[in-house]
Image (cartoon, grey):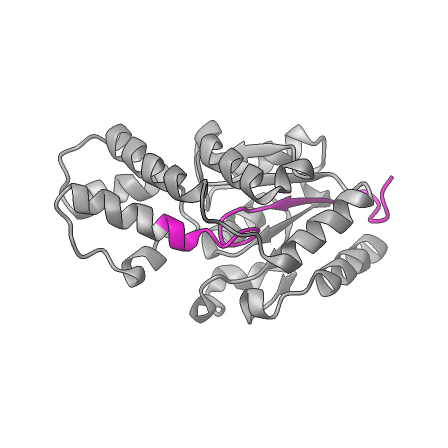
Amino acid sequence: MSTLGALSVIFDLDGTLVDSEPNYYEAGRRTLAEYGVPDFSWADHEAYVGISTRETVADWKRRYALEAPVEELLAVKNRHYLELARTSVRAYPEMRALVERLADEGVPLAVASGSSREAIAAILARTGLDARLRTVVSADEVARGKPAPDVFLEAARRIGADPADCVVVEDAAPGAAAAHAAGMRCIAVPYVAAQADAPEFATAGLLVRGGQDEFTARAAYDWLLDVARTG
């Protein structure tokens, strides 16, 4: 058993482990421009942080009255995103440090993301995190994306963990809601600092209000150690 006892840790990917939201925004901007929507802004994009790619493009179809089917929009956005992900994505240094420490100590780890499996694989390979994070669940593999708990429950199943023994690391309100619905503890590191007061984050066991600027691997590990000791 690891130093954290029965605890397992499930990481969200985009905006949590890696700073990929700029790439998602750019992929979305390019996709919508192709379909006659020229003015998709960063502020527009922020509303979709934490929502699966499939659910994002389905909402675009409704919002912008696009005639293209969801599958087509999804394929185009994923193509643009993969072009960007293969050349420019970085892992947050403190998150990398936390992953490495937990992996070295034998803590079961997983990634549960709203991205496609192909996008997740490209990002983990590009950043080298694939060496430590081998269990991966995409929202495409479950019935419902976040804020439903499906992706986290499937990740727990694959690593053989009781949901009550899982801690989720998340940057977005839908993810924090999904963790709560799954019966899991949550470390919340808001990607959009202005959303730190969102009610979903109030359920987090540890809320790092300042986001990645304030997050440290040491503080997160110490919190996990305290949870492991006190239950």
Residue 91 placed where, x, y %?
A: 57, 52
* Residue in view at x 62 percent, y 41 percent: 128
User: Is 10 positioned to the left or the right of 112 in the image?
Assistant: right
Is most of the magenta stretch helix, strand or loop? loop
Residue 98: image quadrant is: bottom right
- Compared to 122, does 214 lie above or below? below
89 in the magenta segment: no
Residue 214, percent from left and from top: 61, 70
Query: Can residue 49 be seen here?
Result: no
- What span is colored magenta in the figure? 1-24
Q: Is residue 125 above or below residue 4?
A: above
Between 13 and 54, the residue placed more toward the observer is 13
Horizontal and vertical percent for residue 44?
A: 28, 58
Identify whether 103 is placed above or below 226. above
Q: Which of the two residues, 87 or 7, is positioned nearer the viewer here?
A: 87
Q: How many marks can you see? A: 0
State the quadrant of the N terminus. Answer: top right
Compared with 205, 167 (above or below) is above
Left or right? Give the position of 48 relative to 142.
Answer: left
Residue situated in front as seen by the camera: 105 or 26 = 26
Relative image position of residue 148 (x, y in whole percent): 47, 42
**Residue 34 visible in the displayed image:** yes
Compared across the picture, whether 22 is left or right of 226 comes to: left
Q: Is residue 22 magenta?
A: yes
Residue 105 relative to residue 144: left or right: right
Picture residue at 12% right of the left edge, 45% below the top: 36
